[in-house]
């Protein structure tokens, strides 16, 4: 791959001191950063690709800690409906009618959106076909923690999903053995748990044991909606997080998503057990509620940002989620001083890397780390001027300002052109497949306006 030298940039390192370099340079060799800040010219080979980034930013690639790549073809299936309609009449029929090839195309479409928004690494909580997702992520050039969507109990599940605990565990272990650390180590397999509604205690405990055995993470939707707490109070006599703690699964490698309905004691449990949190503000505002994110950050909990799935928020755009994270908590707390821009950038970079158990690999621009970075061009009517350049990254940047995305030393997007995938072909295939799934699943959305078809 050789060397890439980016010079004259405003470099936001996100290192331990959060240092920023003006007029800085960064030198990449193969998949690693070998110099950052002031680069010794003797290190630069004359074959190096040189990029003049004057007036532009360089940041670590964003880490999206919760994204359902297999739901991308279901975008628009869940608007303006309550959660149970969303789940039973839209999402389950959609997902249970996906084929392996659909999952592959869905993940490719989602990968395009991730790359365009500056994401270089993500965690997917579980689709039905890990094989399809692995193929797509390998080709896209991204990093990902992939899992199977695992369910062993609960009412109303589509027939093809009715599996017992051991079958679900075996399938996950099988996926792990086949796909973990493939694509130059970019693809890793994690263990997934859907929700407490569909996961028995036995499955939860054994999935955690497997995650520990293989030194990877466990990804679960936790305390998403009020109904979930009503359910766990009725069935277990305690709220979700208290119950998970009783099962002994709260730990450093536990990635808890949404985490809206937690008591203060449960927030303390997260802190004590070093649980990682994925905050998905768009999905939260739409249906879930307001998570205690400012309190969690104050307690020192590793809070990160995710987009959730396309039918949950319709925008799989991390840049939008950064902006929403800055707004949502100021609003409900009636306190404009909470959730500062610099905290939000940490959530989307180094906290994300830490939550994915990869803090030694990426999340900051430092010598020896993987070359996962993005170039931001702020020269647009919507982003200039830059009186407060760090705040602008959160408050006025759009994903269209992300000019180039580099992952593992390879350009995934350069000057807005996708390098690893054929974008036009994927868009065409995605439209055709989405229409076919919609028909196969028997979903029939009502017309919103009187529609006359010519
Ligand atoms: Zn989710």
Image: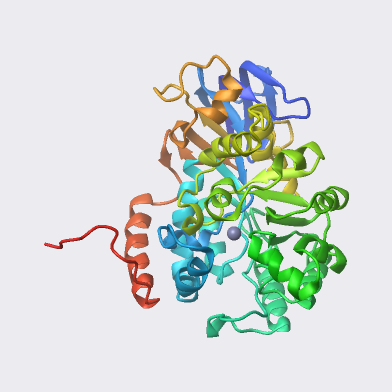
User: Which image quarter has ligand 1?
Assistant: bottom right
Quadrant holding the C terminus: bottom left
284 to the left or right of 347: left
Colour mapping: rainbow
Q: Nearer the viewer, residue 328 or 105?
A: 328
The percent position of residue 426, horizontal first and vertical second, equals 38, 56
Q: Is residue 385 visible?
A: yes
The percent position of residue 53, horizontal first and vertical second, equals 51, 21
Quadrant holding the N terminus: top right
The image quarter in which residue 292 lies: top right
164 to the left or right of 447: right
Q: Nearer the viewer, residue 44 or 171?
A: 171
- Measuring 74% from the left and 77% from the top, which residue is drawn there? 200
The percent position of residue 44, horizontal first and vertical second, equals 63, 24
Q: Is residue 98 visible?
A: no
Name above or below for residue 174 compared with residue 302: below
The percent position of residue 218, horizontal first and vertical second, equals 74, 61
What is the tally of numbered marks visible in this picture? 0
Name above or below for residue 413 compared with residue 83: above
């Amino acid at each position: 791959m050789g060397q890439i030298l980016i010079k004259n940039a405003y470099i936001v390192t996100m290192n331990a001191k959060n240092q920023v370099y003006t007029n800085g340079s960064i030198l990449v060799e193969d998949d690693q950063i070998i110099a950052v800040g002031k680069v010794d010219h003797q290190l630069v080979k004359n074959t190096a690709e040189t990029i003049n980034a004057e007036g532009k930013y360089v940041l670590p690639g964003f880490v999206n800690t919760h994204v359902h790549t297999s739901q991308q073809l279901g975008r628009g299936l869940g608007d303006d409906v309550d959660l149970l309609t969303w789940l039973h009449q839209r999402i389950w029929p959609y997902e249970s009618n996906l084929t392996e090839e659909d999952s592959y195309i869905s993940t490719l479409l989602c990968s395009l959106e991730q790359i365009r928004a500056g994401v270089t690494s993500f965690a997917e909580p579980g689709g039905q076909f890990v094989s399809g997702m692995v193929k797509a992520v390998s080709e896209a050039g991204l990093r990902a923690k992939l899992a199977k969507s695992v369910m062993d109990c609960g009412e109303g599940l589509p027939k093809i999903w009715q599996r017992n605990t051991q079958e679900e565990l075996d399938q996950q272990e099988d996926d792990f053995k086949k796909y973990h650390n493939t694509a130059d180590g970019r693809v890793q397999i994690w263990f997934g748990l859907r929700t407490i509604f569909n996961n028995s205690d036995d499955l939860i405990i054994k999935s955690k044991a497997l995650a520990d055995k293989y030194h990877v993470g466990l990804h679960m939707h936790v305390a998403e909606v009020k109904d979930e707490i009503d359910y766990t109070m009725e069935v277990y006599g305690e709220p979700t997080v208290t119950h998970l703690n009783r099962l002994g699964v709260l730990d450093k490698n536990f990635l808890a998503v949404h985490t809206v309905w937690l008591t203060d004691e449960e927030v303390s449990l997260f802190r004590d057990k070093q649980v990682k949190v994925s905050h998905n503000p768009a999905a939260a505002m739409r249906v879930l509620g307001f998570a205690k994110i400012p309190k969690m950050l104050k307690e020192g909990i590793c809070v990160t940002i995710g987009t959730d799935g396309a039918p949950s928020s319709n925008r799989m755009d991390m840049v939008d989620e950064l902006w929403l994270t800055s707004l949502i908590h100021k609003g409900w707390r009636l306190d404009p001083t909470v959730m500062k821009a610099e905290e939000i950038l940490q959530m989307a970079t180094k906290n994300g890397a830490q939550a994915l158990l990869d803090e030694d690999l990426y999340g900051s621009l430092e010598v020896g780390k993987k070359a996962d970075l993005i170039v931001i061009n702020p020269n647009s009517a919507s982003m200039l001027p830059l009186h407060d350049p760090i705040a602008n990254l959160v408050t006025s940047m759009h994903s269209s300002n992300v000019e180039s995305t580099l992952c593992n030393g390879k350009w995934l997007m350069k000057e807005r052109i996708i390098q690893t995938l054929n974008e036009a072909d994927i868009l065409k295939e995605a439209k055709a497949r989405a229409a076919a799934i919609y028909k196969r699943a028997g979903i029939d959305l009502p017309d919103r306006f009187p529609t006359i078809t010519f």
